[in-house]
Amino acid sequence: MTTFDTDVLVLGSGSAGLVAALTAAAQGLRVTVLEKTDRLGGTTAMSGAGTWIPANHLAAEAGIEDSVEEALTYIRAAAPEGWAETEEPLWQAFVKAAPEMLKFVEAKTPLRFALTPEPDPLRTLPGAKLRGRMMSPRALSRWRAGRFAFRIRKSTIPEIFTYHEAVTTDIYHKPYSTALSLAPRLLWRWLVNARGKGTALVTGLLRGCLDAGVRFELSARAMELTQDATGAVTGAVVERGGAREVWTAAAGVVIATGGFEWDADLLARHFPGPVDYRGSPTAHEGDGQRMAAAAGAELARMDQATIAPSIPVRYQGQVLAQPVPFHTETNAMLVNRHGERFMNELTFNIGEALDRRDPATGQPVHLPAWVITDARMLDQVPPVRWAAKADPAWMRAAPDIGTLARLIGVEPVALEASVARFNAFAAAGRDEDFGRPARPDPAAAGDKRRRAGMDPITRAPFLAMPLSRSILGTKGGARTNEHAEVLRPDGSVIPGLFAAGIAMANPIGSRNVGTGTTIGPNMAWGYIVGKRLALRNAAAAG
């Protein structure tokens, strides 16, 4: 086999891998990024690039007070019971590194971030902030990525818009008039090949990496890690162009390969029950998790994921998930497999609620779940109408609630009672079961993607759409310490092996603390990896 050598071998080209590569290269290391597919950016490129970073300099410049201590207080309060025992050191490392990472990325790339008006969604918890932690990159021309300008993975969401425009306009309900109002800006972006969201983020990180001398190899799939007699990881065996190669990495190997949601066996084992759609590259088959385990790593948090209400969309010949919060419409309710309403539809961490498991069996207790609504939904949210064409089996329609119940396999009497009770709450202006605001909520007025209030479900045809689980990325993998070094089951470090992003045992799992608590932490962990690699290399050289 042909042999290649480098200082740092990064497996995967999403935000975690790219920031790790940039950080290591900026400190003089030779870095090579191996991307399994022929497109760069992974799930990051497909994302909205909402980015949650506490105690950042943009907030400080805007006069918003925040601190590492307040961020830690918020994360601790939000975390599931018992998580602090293993995750506290990682939370501390994240909140300390994240503000440094943001300054570093803006200094070393053409990326410029801007705050959004979004509050921390769990705003009643101690340490929460009304503004200042959520941001997203400004639009950036793909030409800045040089020879990779058209090798950036496309998204299931329209990247011609920025995340800021998605948050501050009513694009979900009024896509045509919104696009018309932004026409001069959108035309300019089209002319200069500029895009927002995940495309902008990957473009800017690629430019920074290229300027720092990072080498990229596409269609290069890591098959297994190589180790010396002591168990230290020394590189990887890679399959490229039908042949196998050996890559040696003097400083270390970084697993940033994403999730395992496209591996049927792993998905069934860790997410039993129905899954609607997936919103990530089909190459996310758990390669990094398997390689880490084979090298002796402990895998953890394998039941965690980014689960988002989504609609089907056609993407490269397949049906994938496009995140759209259609379940929050005023004339929409959510029912479980018994046809009973079981939660406030405006709950932020709805994915965690949908994925609730029976402790005895490990099976989901609510699924399959359904959004029940009426004909007005098709006019209120045009993307829902388009989704019904993307996957004709997605939407069920019936002239009455009883017939609709039979179409989705629930008891007609139960569903009729649930709809009647929802309608009564809407008419009375009070949700007595789950406390959903039945009238417009001033506190939610800044988020135009959600329509606060409740309206009766009365206009035929009545509609049902599945809302079981759409997975944008699993969040389990190799257990790491606060330096992103991969650990064995006994807690010892596997020398030379690091993990970051959603390929690691993510310290912030399904219960997100903000819309951007995948991208922000992913980038921070990439930064932590890059800094640790430089220290390890310096120690080896000394």
Image (tube, rainbow, N blue to C red):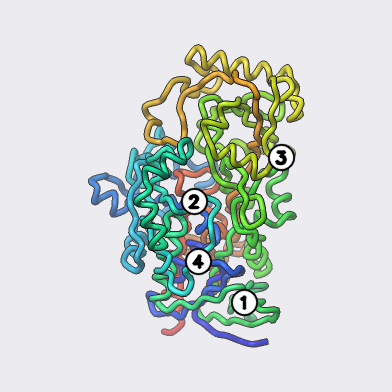
**Residue 146 visible (yes or no):** yes
Residue 102 on image: x %, y %: 35, 59
- In terms of image quadrants, where is residue 366? top right
Amino acid at dot 4:
Gly
CA separation, marks 3 and 1?
Answer: 43 Å
Determine contact: label 4, label 2, CB under 8 Å.
no
Determine contact: label 4, label 3, CB under 8 Å.
no
Q: Earlier in the sequence, mark 3 or mark 1?
A: 1
Picture disc at residue 431: none
CA separation, marks 4 and 2?
Answer: 24 Å
Q: Which residue is mark 3?
A: 393
Q: Earlier in the sequence, mark 4 or mark 2?
A: 4
Amino acid at dot 2:
Pro
Query: As displayed, is residue 427 above or below residue 378?
Result: above
CA separation, marks 4 and 3?
Answer: 37 Å
Q: Quadrant of the N terminus?
A: bottom right
Secondary structure of the residue carrying numbered label 4: helix
Q: Which residue is mark 4?
A: 17
Q: Quadrant of the C terminus?
A: bottom left
Residue 58 on image: x %, y %: 29, 52
Question: Residue at point 39% right, 57% down?
Answer: 189
Q: Which residue is mark 2?
A: 158
Frontmost of labels 3 and 1 is 3
Secondary structure of the residue carrying numbered label 1: strand
Frontmost of labels 2 and 1 is 2
Q: Which residue is mark 1?
A: 236
Left or right: residue 20 versus residue 112 is right
